[in-house]
Image: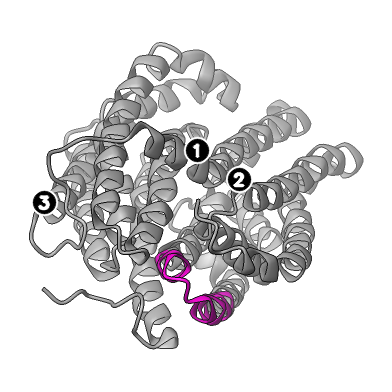
Amino acid sequence: MKKENDLGRDEIGSLVLKIALPSMLAQFVSVLYSIVDRMYIGHIANVGEIALAGVGVCGPVVGSAAVWISWGGSPLMGIRMGEGKQEEAQRILRTCFAMLLVFSLAMMALVIPLRAPMLRFFGASETIYPYADAYFTAYLAGTVFALLATGLNQLIIAQGFAAQAMKLVVLGAAMNIALDPLFIFALNMGVRGAAVATVLSQMASATGALIFLHGKRATVRLTCGSISLPAAKKVLTLGFTPFAIIAIDNVMLIAMNAILQKYGGAEMGDRLVTCAVIAQSFMLVMTMPLGGISGGTQSILSYNYGAHQFDRVRAAQKYIRRLCMGFTAVMMVLAFAAGGLFVRLFTQDEEVARLSVWAIRVCMLAAIPLGAQYAIVDGFTALGQVKLSFLLSFFRKAAYFAALFVLPALFGAKAAFFAETVSDILGPLASAITYKWTIDRVLSDGHARI
């Protein structure tokens, strides 16, 4: 059957849009999993604000493992597809599927017994802990569905089926929106109900992904057969950078919560954590679709890199970078124009709302350069340049941590929110300089396969 998109022959500008837009929309819808949960939880009578802070300290622990495997496997599979090595691409898909299953079981075995000290370390106070534990425990029970839904979706996008991947995400999000009020309010399950609704929604998305990958439409089908340990090693190597980004993002959330509790004190600590959760929710509305653009279009870069069509790689990189920066510019305008409307989805408390709007605007001050950072780093990952992408990501995170620990010590707890601005200026600057210096060499060495 005709592919949804021909990665090697379609006109580059329209190809980038045809893959980037569904991928962006898929991630926008995907973020509704957490946003909708937080919206409903924030309006639970009497305990909404505390419960919201409790959910916020959990962080996307499970999602980081799915990203490690799928974002490592998708460029590798794309390069093999571009080389015309269909059997190898199929073996990589089987290997990724097996790794997702193994990782899900390992995470459940390791994290569930350790959830209490983990949540304490994440910044859960005595008041917040019961809500964080209720949500986290129920969510971890569905780890396998979370990993399969996220991981297989990216491997579908890597084959050029961005619209199909978007449909699967929409399926899960629609279920989540419908089930949240049922479990949270009608069945009186509170935050645990929000997690159960999310697990059931991810189960639906994972099932849909498996059906598609077993069907005739898939370019690379998921069939019975052997897996490859060397391929698994390469997947882990390639996927380490995006995994490390998310893992460090989790540490950033932990550090932010701890700093806010330390400098905010008993009077303002939990309130500032709640504001941080709301601000981070807005950032997710930007960064997840942004990652959809830069991550979804990796398939174009990987395929044409494998096919030695380097002019198409350059052209695609230009379009992707412009699209990323255009999207972040729009989100920056929305932050300043409609931040208050967004905040009201989570809280009716006037003081929390005021501080949250301010925090969102601070975090979005340097959003446009961040768009270039995503395009460059994910572009290097798509070309197999793991060291470059990791170092650039690590530099931005290091800038964040330095600012996070210095600014509140000098100017008080609220100054912690400016750490995002500092990192979003210094990180993209370093990435732009590195790209200019290295891209010619990377493409000239393109015949050296990874």
Direction from residue 410 to residue 444 in the image, left or right? left
Tag 2 or tag 3, which sits nearer the N-term? 3
**For mark 1, what is the residue?**
56
Image location (x, y in percent) of residue 272: 65, 41
**Residue at mark 3 to residue at mark 2: CA–CA distance:** 42 Å
**For mark 2, what is the residue?**
276
First to last magenta residue range: 299-321
Tag 3 or tag 1, which sits nearer the N-term? 1
The amino acid sitting under disc 2 is Ala
Residue at the image position 58 percent from the left and 72 percent from the top: 328
Q: Secondary structure at mark 2?
A: helix
**For mark 3, what is the residue?**
214
Residue 64 in view, yes or no? no
Residue at the image position 27 percent from the left and 64 percent from the top: 166
Asked whether disc 1 touches disc 2, contact meaning CB atoms under 8 Å apart, the reply is yes
Residues packed near mark 1 inside 10 Å, few (<14), some (14 to 19) or many (20 plus): many
Say which of marks 3 and 2 sits in front: 3
- Nearer to us in this view, 285 or 145: 145
Tag 2 or tag 1, which sits nearer the N-term? 1
